[in-house]
Image (cartoon, rainbow, N blue to C red):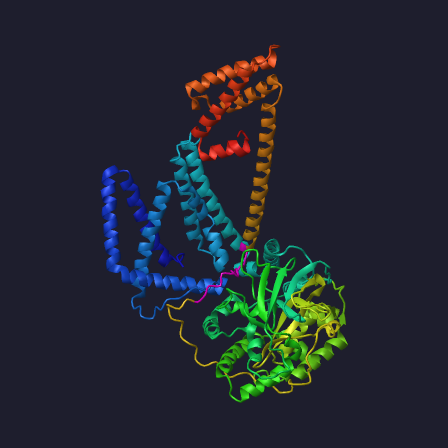
């Protein structure tokens, strides 16, 4: 926002002017205090005169920031109503001027009181903003920013008063900082000349580097152990299926049921991977989901909501508790049953991102959580779907009917996208898919045709090679290799359903099978191993919601399956278009922030994250190492000083005193210097004389060391004391 030249100039001008005034008045002693007081009064008076314009400018920039964070990073903040603002340019200018003044004053306070930690924190400001927003600052703005930081650091060093800091080193630091910035700028210009931005963005090397960096970060954050081959949608990383017998999840159920536990859900297919809904697309739907969530309508709980609309004693209606302990599975997901009655505490009001994948909160995810859930409705979803059609046809529950029609339209726009190349392939292999603009093929026909095609033409095998070639993953599976496991079948089936006009998604998660709950009683814990990891397809049944459909032949008999011949005969049609969108939520309404930051990472910035992780690892190893060495050095020193042999103990103490004294004789008082000279003589006698060392001499030596340490600590800065303590290990 502030990097555009038209906005940067008044901001920088205000910063420089206020900085100059603060610097000049700092040298005027008491007169400077009077001048700064007058400036404060003038600035405050100006604020009261222009406060409306300043607040309007703040609202405009806040909305811009909100839109950027929402579309790029999935961070949802409240927007202000700015429709009544007339003079936008004047409002922006007023806000920029006062913002520049505030920045200059804060900077002056930092320099005046030597708050070094804030200066170092500024270094990470640009990378963090770049990573969050996916936007790079203008080169000139970036160079000016970092030159300013170097100048701040140089100023703090000059004013530190340390003897080791000379005028020459100050100039060297300043020129070195500026030269570094200019070198970076020149390197960027050179890189742009040899590789265009478009080529760089589409570079396979860069793309792979981004994926590897993000994968490495996710592994460090969320994965305690590799227990299966679920690829988190990264299809070209999925090779042979391997799974461990180790426990992935511990599930405690009040009413033991076989369930699908949904983890990663992919809505967007790009030929090599499945991804959740794009943050930019999600942000465009913020109003829709805000009002849906106000009504209590969530895609994750829709199946339970639908069940509550129908009266059928044959369907499960008992709500019970289910607790999940994630032991070794990926902790970034909350593994959710389709029958969930309510979202976990703290997840209500989430953004559209939760509709595709319910992400765990916390930097390292979440290992323990609980739900309230119905009994297994998936095995009866065809019957439930038929009952829902009847209920809605009678006009009952207009609130659910209206909310579902809105959500239905969103689903059809988001989860029916199909690459052109695959549409051509499916037309050749599956025949006519019908007119998707008018409606979809009936569910039973679509399921039967897709199953028949996959059973006839594909071979199930866990020993599948990693697909490393260029081109579409699904196209290769269907036309070339024709061998795969659940990841391959679920991917192909999801796209085939879209060919028939049925919204579908790719899902990874875990199965609680009928075999797992055999002989289990209420409150028993079911241990789900890595071998229960699985990938499947889910389709959207109009009026009902998302339901899993098993398309991998080897798993047909694993879970209880609905009677596909009942309740799926009707040919579906797309819902009517959504009426005119509601206005922006009122400013006083606070759209809950989705603090699970889905970082919109792109370009080489992901490598920066990896480098920061490596740096943190190095720091951790360094801290552990220096602390370990310090503990050992102190233990060895105390052992020598407390030895039974007076001569050896005094020799060790005298040597230690000599090291302390070497840090500067002028740092000690005359009394301590006299004590040290006496300790030196005692140490010489202990080392070279055959005479014994008296107990009093030993005590005097120990007392001298205590005094030297005390005075040395007081004379040194906190940084120098830290060096002596952990690097030199003197304390």
In the rendered structure, the answer to whether residue 323 lies left or right of residue 720 reads right
Task: Tell me where residue 48 appears, x and y as whole percent.
Answer: 25, 58
The image quarter in which residue 4 lies: bottom left
In percent of width and height, residue 711 lies at 44, 26
Residue in the foreground of this view, choosing between 643 and 519: 519
Q: Residue 520: tell me if it is visible.
A: yes
Q: Is residue 572 visible?
A: no
What residue do we see at 61% from left, 87% from top?
A: 571
Front in this rendered view, residue 434 or 349 = 349
Residue 242 located left or right of residue 539: right
Quadrant for the N terminus, please.
bottom left
Magenta region, main secondary structure = loop
Q: Is residue 385 above or below residue 338?
A: below
**Count the marks: how many?**
0
Q: Which residues are magenta?
A: 591-605
- Is residue 242 rendered to the left or right of residue 309? right
Which quarter of the picture shows residue 9? bottom left
At x 60%, y 10%, the residue is 691
Percent position of residue 15, x then y:
33, 50
Residue 597 lies in the magenta stretch: yes
- Looking at this view, name the residue that lies furthest to the front: 522
The residue under the point 45% across, 53% down is: 139
In this rendered view, identify the residue nearer to me: 362 or 422: 362
Asked whether, in this view, residue 563 is left or right of residue 394, the answer is right
In the rendered image, residue 709 lying in the magenta stretch gets the answer no
- Considering every residue shown, the one lying at the far bottom of the view is 394
Q: Position of residue 376 (x, y in %)?
A: 64, 75
């Amino acid at each position: 926002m502030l990097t555009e030249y038209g906005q940067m100039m008044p901001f920088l001008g205000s910063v420089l002017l206020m900085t100059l005034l603060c610097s000049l008045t700092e040298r005027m002693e008491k007169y400077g205090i009077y001048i700064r007081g007058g400036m404060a009064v003038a600035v405050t008076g100006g604020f009261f005169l222009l406060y409306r314009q300043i607040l309007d400018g703040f609202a405009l920039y806040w909305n811009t920031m909100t839109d950027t964070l929402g579309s790029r990073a999935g961070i949802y903040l409240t927007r202000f109503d700015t429709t009544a603002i007339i003079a936008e340019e004047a409002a922006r200018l007023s806000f920029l001027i006062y913002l520049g003044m505030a920045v200059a004053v804060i900077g002056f306070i930092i320099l005046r009181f030597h708050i070094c930690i804030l200066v170092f924190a500024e270094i990470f400001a640009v990378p963090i903003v770049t990573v969050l927003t996916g936007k790079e600052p203008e080169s000139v703005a970036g160079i000016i920013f970092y030159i300013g930081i170097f100048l701040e650091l140089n100023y703090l060093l000059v004013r530190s008063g340390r003897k080791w800091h000379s005028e020459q080193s100050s100039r060297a630091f300043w020129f070195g900082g500026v030269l570094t910035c200019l070198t970076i700028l020149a390197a960027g210009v050179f890189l742009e000349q040899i590789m265009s931005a478009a080529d760089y963005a589409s570079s396979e090397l860069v793309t792979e580097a981004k994926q590897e960096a993000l994968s490495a970060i996710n592994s460090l954050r969320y994965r305690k152990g590799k227990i299966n081959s679920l690829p988190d949608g990264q299809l070209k990383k999925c090779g042979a299926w391997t799974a461990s017998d180790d426990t992935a999840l511990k599930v405690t159920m009040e009413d033991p049921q076989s369930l699908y536990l949904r983890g990663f859900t992919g809505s967007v297919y790009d030929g090599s991977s499945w991804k959740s809904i794009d943050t930019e697309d999600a942000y465009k739907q913020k109003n829709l989901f805000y009002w849906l969530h106000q009504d209590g309508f969530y895609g994750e709980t829709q199946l339970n909501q639908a069940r509550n609309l129908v009266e059928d004693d044959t369907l499960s209606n008992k709500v019970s508790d289910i607790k999940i302990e994630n032991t070794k599975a990926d902790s970034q997901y909350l593994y959710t049953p389709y029958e969930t009655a309510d979202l976990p505490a703290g997840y209500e009001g989430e953004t559209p991102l939760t509709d595709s994948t319910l992400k765990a909160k916390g930097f390292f995810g979440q290992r323990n959580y609980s739900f309230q859930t119905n009994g297994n409705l998936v095995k009866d979803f065809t019957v439930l779907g038929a009952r829902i059609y009847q209920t809605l046809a009678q006009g009952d529950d207009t609130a659910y009917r209206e909310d579902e029609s809105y959500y239905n339209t969103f689903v059809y726009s988001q989860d029916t996208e199909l690459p052109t190349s695959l549409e051509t392939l499916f037309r050749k292999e599956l025949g006519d898919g019908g007119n998707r603009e008018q409606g979809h093929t009936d569910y039973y026909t679509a399921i039967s045709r897709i199953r028949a095609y996959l059973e006839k033409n594909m071979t199930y095998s866990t020993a599948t090679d990693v697909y490393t070639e260029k081109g579409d993953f699904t196209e290769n599976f269907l036309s070339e290799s024709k061998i795969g496991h659940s990841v391959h079948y679920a991917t192909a089936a999801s796209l085939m359903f879209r060919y028939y006009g049925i919204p579908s998604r790719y899902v990874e998660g875990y199965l609680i099978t009928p075999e797992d709950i055999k002989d289990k009683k209420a409150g028993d814990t079911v241990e789900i191993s890595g071998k229960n990891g699985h990938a499947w397809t889910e389709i959207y049944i109009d009026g009902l919601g998302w339901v899993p459909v098993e398309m991998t032949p080897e798993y047909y008999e694993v879970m209880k399956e609905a009677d596909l011949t009942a309740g799926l005969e009707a040919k579906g049609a797309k819902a009517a278009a959504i009426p005119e969108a509601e206005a922006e939520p009122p400013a006083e309404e606070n759209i809950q922030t989705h603090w699970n930051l889905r970082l919109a990472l792109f370009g080489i910035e992901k490598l920066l994250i990896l480098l920061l992780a490596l740096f943190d690892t190095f720091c951790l190893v360094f801290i552990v190492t220096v602390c370990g060495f310090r503990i050992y050095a102190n233990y060895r020193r105390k052992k020598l000083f407390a030895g039974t042999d007076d001569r050896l103990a005094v020799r060790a103490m005298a040597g230690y005193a000599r090291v302390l004294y070497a840090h500067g004789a002028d740092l000690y008082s005359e009394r301590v210097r006299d004590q040290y000279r006496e300790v030196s003589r005692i140490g010489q006698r202990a080392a070279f004389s055959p005479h014994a060392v008296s107990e009093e001499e030993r005590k005097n030596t120990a007392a001298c060391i205590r005094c030297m340490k005390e005075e040395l600590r007081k004379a040194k800065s906190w940084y120098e004391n830290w060096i002596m303590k952990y690097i030199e290990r003197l304390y």
